[in-house]
Image (cartoon, grey):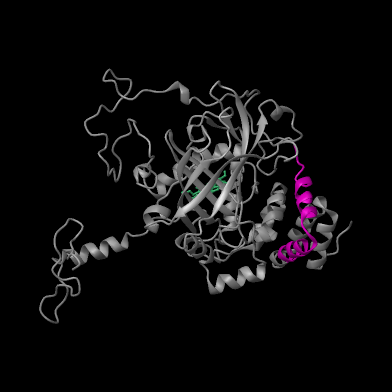
Amino acid sequence: MTEFKRLTTTTGSPVHDNQNSQTAGQRGPVLLQDFHLIEKLAHFNRERIPERVVHAKGAGAHGVFEVTHDVHHLTKAKFLSEVGKKTPVFIRFSTVAGERGSADTDRDPRGTAIKFYTEDGNYDIVGNNTPVFFIRDPLKFPDFIHTQKRNPQTNLKDPQAIWDFWSLSPEALHQITTLFSNRGTPKGYRHMHMFGSHTFQWISEDGQTVWVKYHFKSEQGIANMRSDEARHMASVDPDFATRDLFEAIDRGQFPAWRLFVQIMPLEDAHSYRFDPFDVTKVWSQKDYPLIPVGRLVLNRNPENYFAEVEQSAFSPANIVPGIGFSPDKMLQGRLFAYADAHRYRVGTNHNALPINQPQSPVHHYQRDGAMRFDGNGGSAINYEPNSANGPKEDGDAKLGNYEVSGAWGSYAYPDDDHYTQAGDLFRLLPPNEQDDLIDNVVNAMRPVTRDVQLRQVEHFKKADIDYGRRVAQGLGLVVEN
Ligand code: HEM
């Protein structure tokens, strides 16, 4: 016999009727004294938290990361300390521009946010399925995202705004070329690579530092949709990627990625042929080959979407000893933006929620705040320094050093070669994928005014004359060579 479980209010009081509201008489109005009804309706009104301002639509999964190759001479990060070491992870995949109910197959980069629950606290790699980004200064991020979202008057997606901004921000060209290739419509989350995109720092036990970039290569291989397939899927199964991930894990087909890193000696950053911290560019793998590190496997679906996926909060500022930041301006902007977003979206105590809570000891002097649902530090002292042997700083967690010099200022990046890598990418595509890229760009730019089309075509031409000519031809533009 199954055990009888009594229905209660949230304060544990038994509910005597969950089918009929209390009324004054058989046909009379509903009574204010029906606190169960009122609690139910009032709680329902508060079920939604604000969706993420970007990356609102997503899917998550739990898994494990295992070190397969020795990198302990490069970083003292404990979760990378020895071959065979395993660390639990939680990952959230997402699209960027769409709302929480938008289609999974929209043309967009895919977010790949990974939380490693290490013994030294949480380490988050909050990246994308592309190694580069559209812009390289955080000051431009809100403007950029405004163009990706809806027009303030019509509430419609606005190609004019998108291409107006891009044609005036040529640094976007490399990422535009990736986005309008078939990689902009991956066949679900399992069939794409993941990148940390920015440059980070690794710090070794003896204080040596190197620059590092992360590449997670899908063991499932790359599979993309062509744009007609992606559009069709958006109408027949808008949750395609979410379903694909959940069902694969459910049937025991666990998706996996191999982690590789590119390592750049600290001093090379001064002499490399471009600013290696510019997130619109990749480092050549001939210069800095991929070094294998480990394997990440997703093997468990969330039990509850809201508790685990919606409330998850990732931040590039969540690091552990052995990892540091680079002067990449975008990264520096993001170090502020994420925790600020979490305080607004989830609340100031978001890191105490089970999905965000580190699986290592947490000791700090932060107290109180809305929804402080743990013991709030109990009777422990709440200031530091103190003579009560409270938690103290650990110098070992210090970030790695790098030199900075010069006067403060609003400096532009010294180089404006937005074209070489975008052109290389175009030339690397097989002919049929070049055709798809051109078609996708032309279709996206059709609704845009001529002046913007002409300005953007000039950028394509600078990347590769054939690229520019073919887009111009598709748009029926007459352009000079
Ligand atoms: C989500 C800001 C650039 C990847 C977010 C969120 C904000 C934000 C506010 C929502 C966070 C939340 O509510 O939990 C910014 C700013 C950027 C920037 C200000 C530039 C200055 C980037 C770049 C990448 C990236 C370059 C990838 C390389 C992501 C991902 C998420 C996200 C994956 C979703 C995290 C999740 O699944 O919860 N971003 N972002 N962002 N961002 Fe960025």
Quadrant of image for the N terminus: bottom left
Whole-percent x, y for residue 23 in the image = 14, 75
Does residue 74 appear in this view?
A: yes
Decide which of 340, 211 is in the foreground and name it: 211
Q: Is residue 236 left or right of residue 346?
A: right
What residue span does the magenta drawing correspond to?
415-442
Most frequent secondary structure within the magenta stretch: helix
Residue 307, picture quadrant:
bottom left
Residue at 74% x, 66% y: name it: 439
Q: Is residue 6 left or right of residue 143?
A: left
| Most distant residue in the right direction | 481
Q: Is residue 294 above or below residue 204?
A: below
Residue at 20% x, 74% y: name it: 19
| Most distant residue in the left direction | 25
Residue 363, picture quadrant:
top left
| Most distant residue in the bottom direction | 27
